[in-house]
Amino acid sequence: MGPLIWAALAAAVCVPIAAAAASPLLAWRGPVYILAGFAGILALGLMLVQPLLAGGYLPGLSSYRGRRAHHWIGGALVVAVVIHVGGLWITSPPDMIDALLFSSPTPFSPFGVIAMWAIFAVALLAALRRRLGLRPRTWRIAHMLLAIVIVAGSVVHGILIEGTMETVSKAALCALVLGATMKVMADLRVRRKRATLRGESIARQ
């Protein structure tokens, strides 16, 4: 069962990338723009991996390794977003300024910008968590709320863009990211409630 889960995950991430690589629209794009676009696709794929790691659903990984992988892939997600935004800035600074100022006429821009800032906020909080003295519960709530913003913004951003990504594989990946995030958040909430009830039961004994 383990190999099948990993194969399904690899397919979910790689098929949209392969489909985008076969897009005829790439013939009219420069290398920097192409790099930026594929960095965005990779970032969306990494968003599918993150909740699965957080929920412990990927076989063969211990709890410790899962947390470490979640940490490093979070860093890779930040790098992918920086490449995505940086490449688009190089190819068209006025468009990126409009997007960052929420004055772009394209409907997908504000969702991407909001998701970007939420990603940076999570990374910053994670890096400064100990220095800021964040309690585990505070960090968990902040992380979860920002994750919701990241996933919702990224999915809407991706769906609204009509570009090199193939429609069906893009929609499937977005649905998987959204579904996995909702499933993991619900399961983690149930686990915490059970742990709390178990602790109260032991305290009464």
Image (tube, helix red, strand yellow):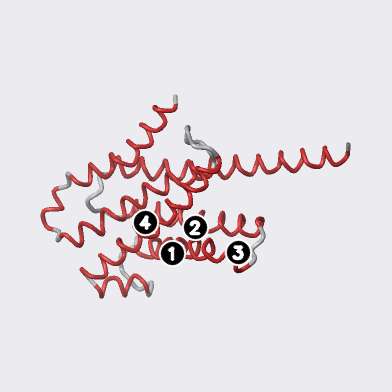
150 relative to 94, above or below: above
Q: How many marks?
A: 4
52 relative to 136, above or below: above
The numbered dot on residue 149 is 2
Q: Earlier in the sequence, mark 2 or mark 4?
A: 2
167 relative to 93, above or below: above
Residue 130 in percent (x, y) is at 60, 64
Which kind of residue does numbered mark 1 sit on? Ile
Q: Residues within 10 Å of mark 2 (few under 14, many from 20)?
A: some
Q: Evaluate if marks 1 and 4 touch, with contact meaning CB atoms under 8 Å apart.
A: no
Residue at point 23%, 53% (across, down): 163
Q: Earlier in the sequence, mark 1 or mark 2?
A: 1
* C-alpha distance separating marks 2 and 4: 12 Å
Residue 193 in percent (x, y) is at 71, 42
Q: Which residue is mark 3?
A: 130
Residue at point 35%, 73% (across, down): 103
Q: Which residue is mark 1?
A: 114
Residue 47 in percent (x, y) is at 42, 49
SS label for mark 3: helix
Q: Evaluate if marks 1 and 2 touch, with contact meaning CB atoms under 8 Å apart.
A: yes
Q: Which residue is mark 4?
A: 157
SS label for mark 4: helix
Q: Evaluate if marks 3 and 4 touch, with contact meaning CB atoms under 8 Å apart.
A: no
Residue 131 in percent (x, y) is at 60, 68
Quarter of the image where one finds residue 15: top left
Which kind of residue does numbered mark 4 sit on? His
Q: Earlier in the sequence, mark 3 or mark 4?
A: 3
User: Which of pointers 3 and 1 indicates the residue nearer the eye?
Assistant: 3
